[in-house]
Image: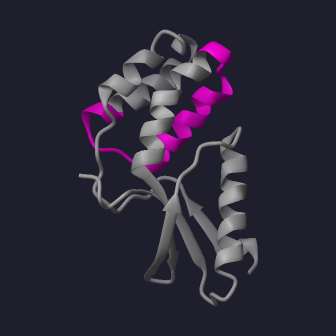
Amino acid sequence: MSRSRVFLLLMRSEATEPTLPESVVRPLCQPFKKAADSVLDLYGMTQTASSPGQCVQCFFKLLHVSDAHSQAALEPLKCWMEEHIEVSIRAGDAHSGSFPLYLDAPDLDQLCESVLERVCLDTMTHTRPIELSFEFRNHVA
């Protein structure tokens, strides 16, 4: 399957959307005061349901500017995201499955690359275009 037939949608979400707990975002304010835009975006997600893709993007923006101390402050956010967000796979109009989101990649590009590799290996028999998106897990209210 060619990669041109695989689409990664960062901003799409169809499942129930939980709000990000303020207790996960508040500790990021001091260590990431120079990345206030991303912290404010995350804070906004504590007030209203949001896109899981936007949450993933903010995480990697903060990771990009982090040092050893501030990386430790990201751990609660990382744990919350890995517990509540998954990668959803659709082939045509049908949901074809999902798998857990693991935020072990050093940046968003490498995360997307590893997701694409996994999906291409698992879905080599699909003849329809494959669509990937970050989704909130269905069992989370």
Q: Is residue 15 magenta?
A: no
Point out residue 44 in the picture as x, y percentages from the top left corner. Answer: 34, 31
Q: Height in image: 52 above or below 122?
A: above
The residue under the point 42% across, 16% down is: 27
What residue is rendered at 59% in x and 62% in y? 8
**Rendered view: 6 above or below 77:** below
Residue 76 horizontal/vertical position (percent) = 45, 29
Could you say which is closer to the camera, residue 107 or residue 37? 107
Q: Quadrant of residue 61?
A: top right
Q: Residue at x 38, y 27 (%)?
A: 24
Q: Position of residue 123 (x, y in %)?
A: 64, 80
- The kind of secondary structure the magenta stretch mainly shows is helix
Residue 12 as seen in the image, left or right of residue 117: left
Coloring applied to the structure: one colour
Whether residue 20 can be seen here: yes
Q: Is residue 88 visible?
A: no
Image: magenta residue range: 45-69
**Residue displayed at 65% across by 70% down:** 119
Name the quadrant of the N terminus: bottom right
Along the line of sight, the residue nearer the viewer: 32 or 141: 141
Query: In the figure, 116 relative to 71: above or below?
Result: below
* Residue 89 shown left or right of residue 116 in the figure: left
Q: Is residue 61 magenta?
A: yes
Would you say 66 lies left or right of 85 here? right
Residue 98 vertical position relative to residue 80 in the rendered view, above or below: below
